[in-house]
């Protein structure tokens, strides 16, 4: 965690990463139970919290300061804004209207923006994603 927690070993960081990644996935998956019972607000909260926890996981690995810098990199800033914006909008829509269609729409945006953000770390992954989407729509 870099300058904030310089005494933390790499092994501890790895445990933090794995713990947060697994917890984020579990929380997001458990959220679908609430959706199946029609509890849209609980679903939106848990799914969004799961995504925040999963994002927090990488901060353990590279450090919080470096994570924020990386998210603000010109190559990732748009995906970051859309991802964080969709997290916030999901919660707003869930609390204000409880409209399941809009909540699911913003969760799909969360997922797509998160995938695009992650792909920015993998060489040529965004190009591959773009090619697959073009092939899927016949362009």
Image: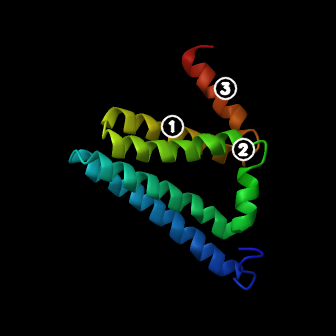
N-terminal label among 2 and 3: 2
The residue at the point 20 percent across, 48 percent down is 37
N-terminal label among 3 and 1: 1
Residue density around tag 3, few if under 14, some if 14–19, many if 20 or more, within 10 Å: few
Q: Quadrant of the N terminus?
A: bottom right
Q: Give the answer, above or below, for where 113 lies relative to 61.
A: above
**Residue 98 image position (x, y, % from top left):** 30, 41
Mark toward the viewer: 3 or 1 = 1
Residue density around tag 2, few if under 14, some if 14–19, many if 20 or more, within 10 Å: some
Q: How many tags in the picture?
A: 3
Q: What is the distance, in whole Å, between disc 3 and disc 1 at their CAs? A: 19 Å
- Element assignment for label 3: helix
Q: Which residue is mark 1?
A: 109
The residue at the point 69 percent across, 67 percent down is 64
**Residue 17 image position (x, y, % from top left):** 59, 69
Quadrant assignment, res 55:
bottom right
Return the residue nearer the eye: 118 or 125.
118
Mark toward the viewer: 2 or 3 = 2
The disc label shown at residue 4, or none = none
Judged left or right of residue 92, residue 15 is right
Q: Which residue is mark 2?
A: 76
| Colour setting | rainbow
Return the residue nearer the eye: 69 or 91.
91
- Element assignment for label 1: helix
Q: Which residue is mark 3?
A: 131
Judged left or right of residue 58, residue 95 is left
Outermost residue, left side: 37
Q: Give the answer, above or below, for where 137 lies relative to 87.
A: above
């Amino acid at each position: 965690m870099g300058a904030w927690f310089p005494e933390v070993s790499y092994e501890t960081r790895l445990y933090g990463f794995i713990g947060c990644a697994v917890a984020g996935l579990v929380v997001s998956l458990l959220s679908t139970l609430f959706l199946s019972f029609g509890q849209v607000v609980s679903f939106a909260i848990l799914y969004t919290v799961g995504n925040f926890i999963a994002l927090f996981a990488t901060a353990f690995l590279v450090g919080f300061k470096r994570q924020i810098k990386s998210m603000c990199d010109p190559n990732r800033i748009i995906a970051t804004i859309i991802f964080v914006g969709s997290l916030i909008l999901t919660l707003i829509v869930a609390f204000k209207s409880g409209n399941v269609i809009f909540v699911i729409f913003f969760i799909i945006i969360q997922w797509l923006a998160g995938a695009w953000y992650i792909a920015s770390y993998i060489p040529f992954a965004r190009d591959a994603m773009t090619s697959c989407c073009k092939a899927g729509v016949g362009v």
